Amino acid sequence: MPNPRCFARKTRYFSSMSTQEILLEEIKHQPEPVLRELRHYLDFLKRQRETEAPMGSVVADTREKLGPAPELDYDQL
């Protein structure tokens, strides 16, 4: 079980660092297999972001063409 004092020290240490700095510091202490897996996951996230970005504009464009949603009378449903 993790030592709560160690976690408290890390939390204080990390609170003054940016996410990028925290990640870089953690990466320095990881073994090569973990680094390879991390690289694979980052590549996956990059590809996912590239394919999802165009879809956001399609949805926005469709919303403009369709206009506001029709009013529904929930009592009739």
Image (cartoon, helix red, strand yellow):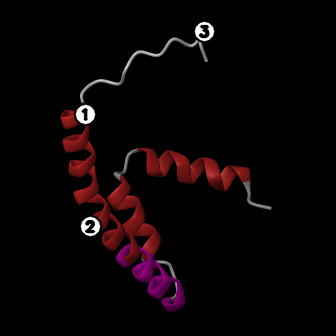
Counting from the top left corner in percent of width and height, residue 44 is at 40, 75
Left or right of 13? Residue 63 is left
**Local SS, label 1:** helix
Real-space Cα separation, disc 1 to disc 3, in angstroms: 25 Å
The kind of residue tagged 2 is Glu
Sooner in the amino-acid sequence: mark 3 or mark 2: 2
Residue 75 higher or lower than 5, as above or below: above
Q: Which residue is mark 2?
A: 50
Mark 3 or 2, which is nearer the eye?
Answer: 3
Left or right of 33? Residue 77 is right
Counting from the top left corner in percent of width and height, residue 50 is at 26, 67
Specify the farthest residue to the bottom: 32
Left or right of 54? Residue 33 is right
How would you rate the neighbour count of disc 2 (Cα within 10 Å): few for under 14, some for 14-19, many for 20 or more?
few
Counting from the top left corner in percent of width and height, residue 12 is at 51, 45
Counting from the top left corner in percent of width and height, residue 49 is at 31, 63
Real-space Cα separation, disc 3 to disc 2, in angstroms: 43 Å
The rendered magenta stretch, by its main secondary structure, is classed as: helix
Sooner in the amino-acid sequence: mark 2 or mark 1: 2
In front: 34, or 4?
A: 34
Disc number for residue 20: none
The kind of residue tagged 1 is Leu
Real-space Cα separation, disc 2 to disc 1, in angstroms: 26 Å
The kind of residue tagged 3 is Asp
Disc number for residue 75: 3
**Local SS, label 3:** loop
Is 9 a magenta residue? Answer: no
